[in-house]
């Protein structure tokens, strides 16, 4: 087995180890046995080269399982978690380490108490900011799941094991957060203040969702329409969204014929990372940015065939830092699967299915279709919708997103300097968001444009991916991975 293949399968084995330990109870002794056996086989490499590959893969899988178990152990080792549901009034002081999420009648934020986190649900006013040091007094509780959503697992992957609802809060100090993150949030808040003076709902809600992933100002009716039309990912700073936008931007630059592969990749990365930092660098965007960056760097300065290796390597880095995102972070799942779809299916759609289409349309539609090949089962399982017209609506909308986002930041910056100038430029953003609303509304008027699924079982998702894997293998015109072919 070549070094490249060994590296790839080692990463896959590590991810498999985390997957198995995430969904099944595996005795730690069994994982340690695999680790010990793998080390022995590596030491016996002089006897048979095959033993080296088997040994390395065994070690990688065992390490993945052990890393997952170590992360789960932190939940039971939590000091604050012991007070959950005890009915005891506790007083905690900590730092708000993320930007608060504002709801219709409340706000939520995480406070860091020494090495642990607590989610606080508080009244909407007075408002709090990132970097505020506060003292909260109330009862700690274990998060409860609701409406089929594993809210407890969702918070666990954020390393939050306790919540405090409507406690007494005292502000102790402000501006104690990281100076860089504080500057990013201040920059973002100034932009939002300008936009809210220049746009009104539902245009404001759509635009804020496109740029910052904040859906608070989107009416419930339009959230449902975005779901049914298969365009909800556009209204979120999701890994899937960032992945699609980066590939579309790169493809657009290449289609102009003005840049080479390396230059198009670098320009795309500069835009993506500028965007990520402008929106406050949320974890979901950072993860997607890392995966996209590794792929573009390999594609631009290495070999296209190494794209799958860069993807699994990025996944290993992210999963080593936090194994729980594999099971509980839908954003990570969609980002990884969208990237995999682009790696394995983009050339098929461009060079075979859409070969005779005009270049610009071919790039956009191929990117949209390829990104959805592997994400569809996860989307159906988590959201219960499938839109038959989604490829068309995404084709009509996705190419607009990078330019609308850039236009929004430009008019936001100018609006801070001159409100009158901002009013003039706001018309362009209003036209863009009106177009989005029009396309979404139109797509839902087509009979049979979408189906609603309820209670999709996990095994059906597994079967779907087995079928997609086989279909991918058949489509790529190769004999398939020869596992230990030296």
Image (cartoon, rainbow, N blue to C red):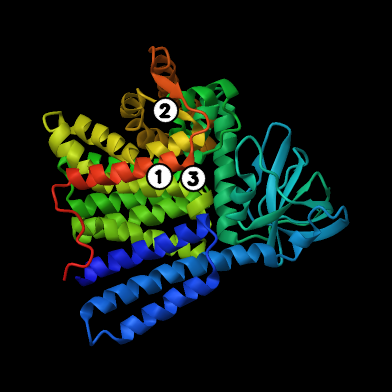
User: Which residue matches tag 1?
Assistant: 462
Residue 419 screen position, x and y as percent: 54, 30
Residue 355 shown left or right of residue 112 in the figure = left
Q: Dot 1 surroundings within 10 Å: few (below 14), some, or many (20 or more)?
A: few
- Mark 1 falls on what kind of element? helix
Q: Is residue 282 visible?
A: no
Q: Disc 1 and disc 2: Cα gap in Å?
A: 17 Å
The answer to whether the residues at label 2 and label 3 have Cβ atoms under 8 Å apart is no
User: Which residue matches tag 2?
Assistant: 386
Residue 101 shown left or right of residue 418 in the figure = right
Q: Residue lying farthest left?
A: 356
Q: Disc 3 and disc 1: Cα gap in Å?
A: 16 Å
Q: Quadrant of the N terminus?
A: bottom left
Residue 303 screen position, x and y as percent: 18, 59
Front residue of this view, candidates 183 and 253:
253
Front residue of this view, candidates 183 and 463:
463
Q: Within the image, what quadrant is residue 160 found in?
A: bottom right
Q: Disc 2 and disc 3: Cα gap in Å?
A: 16 Å
Q: Within the image, what quadrant is residue 175 found in?
A: bottom right
Residue 361 shown left or right of residue 328 in the figure = left
Query: Which is nearer the N-term, disc 1 or disc 2?
Result: 2
User: Which residue matches tag 3?
Assistant: 330
């Amino acid at each position: 087995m070549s070094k490249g293949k060994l590296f790839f399968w080692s990463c896959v084995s590590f991810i498999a180890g985390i997957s198995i330990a995430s969904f099944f109870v595996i005795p730690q002794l069994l994982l340690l046995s695999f680790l010990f056996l793998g080390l022995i086989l590596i030491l016996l490499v002089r006897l048979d080269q095959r033993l080296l590959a088997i040994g390395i893969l065994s070690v990688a899988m065992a390490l993945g399982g052990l890393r997952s178990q170590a992360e789960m152990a932190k939940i039971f080792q939590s000091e604050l978690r012991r007070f959950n549901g005890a009915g005891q009034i506790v007083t905690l002081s900590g730092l708000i380490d993320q930007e608060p999420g504002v709801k219709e009648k409340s706000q939520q934020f995480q406070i860091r108490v020494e090495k642990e986190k607590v989610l606080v649900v508080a009244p909407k006013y007075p408002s709090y900011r990132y970097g505020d040091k506060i003292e909260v007094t109330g009862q700690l509780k274990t998060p409860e799941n609701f409406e089929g959503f594993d809210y407890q697992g969702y918070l666990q992957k954020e390393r939050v094991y306790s919540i405090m609802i409507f406690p007494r809060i005292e502000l102790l100090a402000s501006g104690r957060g990281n100076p860089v993150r504080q500057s990013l949030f201040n920059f973002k808040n100034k932009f939002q203040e300008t936009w809210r003076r220049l746009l009104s709902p539902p245009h404001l809600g759509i635009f804020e969702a496109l740029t910052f992933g904040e859906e608070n100002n989107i009416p419930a009716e339009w959230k449902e329409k975005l779901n049914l039309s298969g365009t909800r990912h556009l209204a979120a700073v999701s890994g899937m969204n960032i992945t699609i936008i980066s590939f579309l931007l790169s493809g657009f630059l290449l289609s102009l014929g003005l840049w080479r592969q390396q230059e198009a990749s670098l320009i795309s990365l500069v835009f993506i990372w500028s965007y990520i930092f402008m929106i406050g660098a949320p974890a979901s965007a950072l993860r997607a940015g890392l995966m996209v960056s590794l792929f573009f760097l390999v594609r631009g300065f290495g070999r296209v065939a190494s794209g799958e290796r860069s993807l699994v390597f990025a996944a290993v880095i992210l999963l080593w830092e936090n194994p729980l995102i594999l099971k509980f972070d839908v954003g990570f799942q969609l980002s990884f699967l969208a990237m995999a779809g682009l790696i394995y299916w983009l050339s098929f759609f461009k060079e075979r299915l859409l070969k005779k289409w005009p270049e610009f349309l071919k790039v956009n539609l191929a990117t949209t279709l390829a990104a959805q090949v592997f994400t569809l089962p996860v989307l159906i399982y988590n959201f219960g919708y499938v839109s038959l017209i989604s490829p068309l609506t995404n084709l009509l909308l996705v190419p607009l997103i990078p330019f609308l986002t850039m236009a929004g930041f430009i008019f936001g910056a100018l609006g801070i300097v001159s409100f009158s100038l901002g009013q003039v430029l706001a018309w362009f953003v209003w036209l863009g968001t009106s177009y989005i609303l029009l396309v979404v509304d139109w797509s839902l008027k087509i009979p049979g444009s979408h189906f609603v699924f309820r209670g999709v079982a996990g095994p059906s998702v597994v079967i779907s991916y087995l079928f997609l894997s086989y279909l991918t293998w058949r489509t790529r015109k190769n004999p398939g991975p020869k596992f230990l072919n030296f």
